[in-house]
Image (cartoon, rainbow, N blue to C red):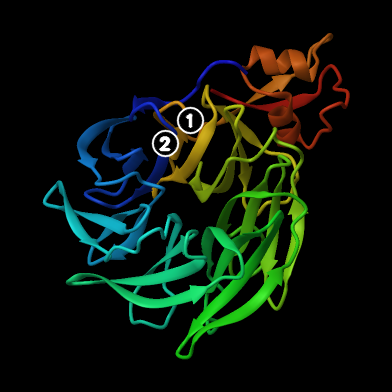
């Protein structure tokens, strides 16, 4: 596969693009940021139109859309020393609030969730420069600080894992200490943060982390990608337990996202080679069922509430991909997975994953294969 197959793309600027999606002015809005620039897009049929451009005071290090304050979501950005937020009001984007400066904090990762302690949904952010987690809550006057937790190492990624009713959510944080990577979990209680289960030593350097409903078990799980090109799915119960590791997807896994897709739900994994591999959830196979091609390295991913997949690339683009259907192909004499991948503009891995085949396995004349229709 060598052709970009996004349904739509737009240029944000020239650097790596962070993306997020939610209900800001409407249900399918997209925020995309690089450098100090945030562009907000609204859907128009199968494409997107630029609504506005925001100029932040300093470089944006992290971005998400969420919190659902009042009736709409907030655009939330982490910088070197502040959290900045914007909201939608009568079809326009306006500043909502910002935190007091925390010099050299470096807010490198953001997550939102209801930690069931402060009477509202929370922003949880990893402050790499302070080796700490900061928790905020949206209020009428802006953002209120709820708690700070020091971390034994440098927190690089954060996610919130929802658990079965009656059990408080877990805050999962990926920590680098010297050359070792680990995943720690914490629960916020009336007494502050309490430690939970952990994965003390990961087999690779963690590059991306996301929470979602990845297995058939109650509650949500974690998925993390590493610099070894694999994605691991981790159940979060009394312990953290790795239940599945994918096949190698590339030189590294640069981005992960979870959300609605093609009438169901999915986990998407992006790579520096520009591929986006898609797993239907619950994930039961190490091989992806679908693949998309961004044309440049994938820097970030997000699903819209309605089921579009949004990618930010390393060369300044924001792209939208849509779920498509499969076609049936009756294998002809001389067909191979490699030839079919070229014919249908897909990959051997995607065809094999959709049909439960080994990538090096044989196919036979008369056999019916499902192949993604682009």
In the image, residue 4 lies at what x, y percent? 51, 20
What quarter of the picture does the N terminus occupy? top right
Question: How busy is the neighbourhood of tag 1: few (under 14 within 10 Å), some, or many (20 plus)?
Answer: many
Q: Which residue is mark 1?
A: 314
Tag 2, which secondary structure? loop
Q: Residue furthest top?
A: 334
Q: Which residue is at 78% across, 53% downward?
A: 203
Residue 30, quarter of the rendered image: top left
* Residue 164 visible in this rendered orientation of the protein: no
Look at the numbered discs 1 and 2 and tell me whether their residues touch, using CB distance below 8 Å. Answer: yes
In the image, residue 32 lies at what x, y percent? 35, 39
Residue 365, quarter of the rendered image: top right
Q: Residue furthest bottom?
A: 191
Q: Nearer the viewer, residue 88 or 202?
A: 202
Tag 1, which secondary structure? loop
Q: Which residue is at 73% across, 51% downward?
A: 284
Image mark for residue 17: 2
Mark 1 or mark 2: name the one nearer the start of the chain: 2
Q: Nearer the viewer, residue 120 or 177?
A: 177
Image mark for residue 303: none
In the image, residue 161 lies at what x, y percent? 55, 67
Q: Which residue is at 74% across, 40% downward?
A: 287
């Amino acid at each position: 596969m060598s052709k970009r197959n996004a349904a739509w793309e737009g240029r944000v600027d020239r650097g790596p693009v962070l993306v997020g999606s939610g209900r800001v002015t409407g249900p399918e809005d997209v925020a995309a940021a690089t450098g100090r620039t945030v562009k907000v897009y609204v859907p128009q049929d199968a494409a997107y139109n630029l609504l506005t451009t925001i100029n932040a005071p300093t470089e944006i290090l992290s971005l998400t859309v969420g919190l659902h304050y009042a009736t709409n979501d907030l655009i939330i950005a982490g910088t070197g020393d502040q959290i900045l937020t914007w909201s939608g009001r009568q079809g326009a984007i306006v500043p909502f609030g910002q935190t007091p400066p925390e010099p050299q904090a470096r807010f490198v990762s953001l997550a939102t969730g209801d930690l069931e302690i402060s009477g509202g949904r929370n922003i949880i952010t990893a402050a790499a420069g302070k080796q700490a987690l900061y928790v905020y809550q949206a209020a009428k006057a802006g953002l209120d600080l709820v708690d700070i937790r020091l971390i034994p190492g440098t927190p690089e990624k954060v996610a919130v894992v929802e658990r079965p009713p009656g059990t408080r959510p877990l805050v999962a944080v990926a920590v680098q200490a010297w050359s070792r990577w680990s995943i720690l979990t914490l629960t916020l209680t009336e007494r502050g943060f309490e430690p939970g289960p952990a994965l003390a030593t990961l087999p690779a350097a963690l590059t991306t982390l996301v929470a979602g409903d990845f297995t058939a078990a109650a509650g949500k799980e974690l998925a993390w990608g590493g610099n070894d090109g694999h994605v691991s799915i981790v159940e979060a119960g009394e312990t953290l337990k790795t239940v599945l590791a994918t096949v190698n997807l590339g030189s590294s896994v640069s981005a992960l996202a979870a959300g609605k897709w093609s009438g169901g739900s999915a986990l998407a994994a992006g790579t520096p080679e520009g591929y986006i591999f898609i797993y239907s959830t619950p994930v039961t196979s190490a091989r992806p069922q679908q693949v998309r091609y961004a044309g440049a390295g994938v820097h970030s991913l997000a699903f819209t509430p309605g089921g579009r997949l949004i990618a930010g690339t390393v060369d300044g683009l924001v792209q939208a991909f849509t779920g498509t259907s499969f076609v049936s192909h009756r294998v002809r004499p001389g067909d191979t997975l490699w030839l079919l991948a070229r014919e249908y503009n897909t990959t051997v891995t995607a065809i094999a994953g959709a049909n439960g085949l080994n990538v090096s396995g044989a196919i036979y004349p008369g056999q019916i294969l499902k192949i993604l229709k682009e």
